[in-house]
Amino acid sequence: MHFEPSFQKRYHKALSDPAMIKAVKNGTGRLRGQRAASIEAVGPERWMAFRDRAEAIRLHVIQHLDQYLEQLVDNVLKKGGHVCLARTGEEAVQYITSLAQKKNAKSIIKSKSMVSEEIHLNHQLEKLGCEVIESDLGEYIIQLAGETPSHIIAPAMHKNRNQVADLFNAVSKKKLSTEIADLCGFAREHLREKFLGIDIGITGCNFAIADSGAITICTNEGNARIISALSPTLVTIMGMERILPSIEDLAVMLSLLARSATGQKLTVYNTLSTGVRDENELDGPQEFHLVIVDNGRSKLLGTKYEKVLNCIRCGSCLNACPVYRNIGGHAYGWVYPGPIGAVLSPLFQGIDKFGELAYATTLCGACCFACPVKIPLHDMLYALRNDKVELENKGELAENIAYKGWSATFASMSRYRFSVRMARRFQFPLVKAGKIAYGPPPISDWLKHRDMPALSDKFFHEIWPELNKDRKE
Ligand code: SF4
């Protein structure tokens, strides 16, 4: 999928796609509602305690990442697995493509993995002549569309059922109904066949358990479980930070992940697998490879952005974000959308390329409030704005002048009062139905999508003495 290099062009394109906006608003609205109901059921105080516990676990892991990585690697090796510690995306791709060549793999089936999107794995495997099939329903839809995910947990959130039916019709060569059950039925039937001829299975990893070497994968469709069971060779790809010390910590995280992501008490299939099958076991891989990817993560350790590594990829911050809900995921231009993407993309890909995303926020803090592991995303977005300005060694000229003027006016009570009186008196050509309706660019663009109330007849500081006078009397 080709992305415009400029964020401005990408979000303009998004804002001119009403079908996408409607689908994203419906999807995020549904997930937000389900999450709110689930928190209500737990009780807000218990929920806060859960979040505190989860944050403490993640902070502890990140602060002792070297120790837990070593323990994880030892345990995977002890259980007969192979481990690749990939410093870059290229190293990870190199390892997996060499394995595919060695196995002479023709059919590779994947479950959802954001890291594999990050390193463009499918493309490289396809170049070798492998058929790569996405088995997660949302990923399958966007694979057919030739697109990238637009949401962390619901990759095809931006598509409506008519668009999905069109994509499936092209594969089935017949006209399917647009009923969701029929569409799911087609995908199930079509994908089931593929599982039987699997050469290599590739899964993502929600959490790797350091003290046992177990890999946890959470899905609502069971596709990762089938892949783990049927693949002769299984590859799991994980970001190096996705570790938990023990299964006790997993209990906290699974409950928090499902509630934050979809409002479920638990994801339907939580699969824990410990690599290669034993002699007595009926299923499981004969060969297991764990690919642990750094790709820019370790350089965040010890920095003001370290806490972003606490992320458990639940997608809750996307659903809470007023910007994401209006522009969808593709406007962010890289793998991770929404507030977490606006932080990760510049940190992983460079502020020069993705620094503009730090402005894809109202700094309202809704993302931070929604985050189960309490990552201060809005503080990080603010810090990224500073870093961007420092990197470029300048602010926009117009912005500099505007802020200097604003600062000079608001620093003096008399100047402030004079300016608001003048603004109130001369705003009338711009006002319609109690709102500022017109303005010069860039304000005119801003007003196309937002309401700005007109200045009121009386401001608070004018009303306050009158109210006090009444009270004294
Ligand atoms: S930043 Fe928080 S809310 Fe957003 S995806 Fe990560 S864990 Fe979920």
Image (tube, grey):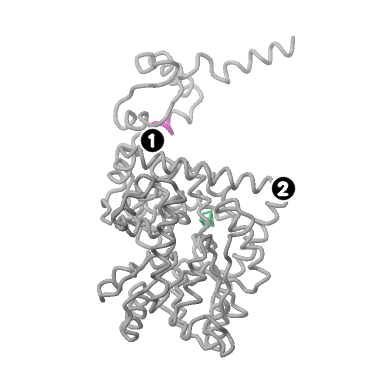
Residue type at mark 1 is Lys
Residue type at mark 2 is Gly
Q: Position of residue 15 (x, y in %)?
A: 34, 39
Is the residue 466 above or below the residue 256 in the image? above
Q: Earlier in the sequence, mark 2 or mark 1?
A: 2
404 drawn magenta: yes
The residue lying furthest to the top in this view is 473
Q: Residues within 10 Å of mark 2 (few under 14, many from 20)?
A: few
Is residue 311 in view from this perspective?
no
The residue labelled by disc 2 is 43
Q: Helix, strand, or loop for circle 1? A: helix
The residue lying furthest to the front in this view is 174
Is residue 28 in view from this perspective?
yes
88 drawn magenta: no
Residue at 62% x, 63% y: name it: 253
Q: Position of residue 320 (x, y in %)?
A: 52, 45
Q: Helix, strand, or loop for circle 2? A: loop
Q: Nearer the viewer, residue 425 or 115?
A: 115
Is the residue 347 above or below the residue 466 in the image? below
Query: Pointer 2 and pointer 1: residues touching (CB < 8 Å)?
Result: no
Q: CA distance from mark 2 to mark 1?
A: 47 Å
Badge 1 residue CB within 8 Å of ligand 1: no
Q: How many marks?
A: 2
Residue at 38% x, 35% y: name it: 404
Disc number for residue 415? none
| Range of residues picked out in magenta | 403-408
Q: Quadrant of residue 280?
A: bottom right
Residue at 70% x, 50% y: name it: 42
Q: Nearer the viewer, residue 377 or 341?
A: 341
Q: Position of residue 301 (x, y in %)?
A: 50, 68
The residue labelled by disc 1 is 404
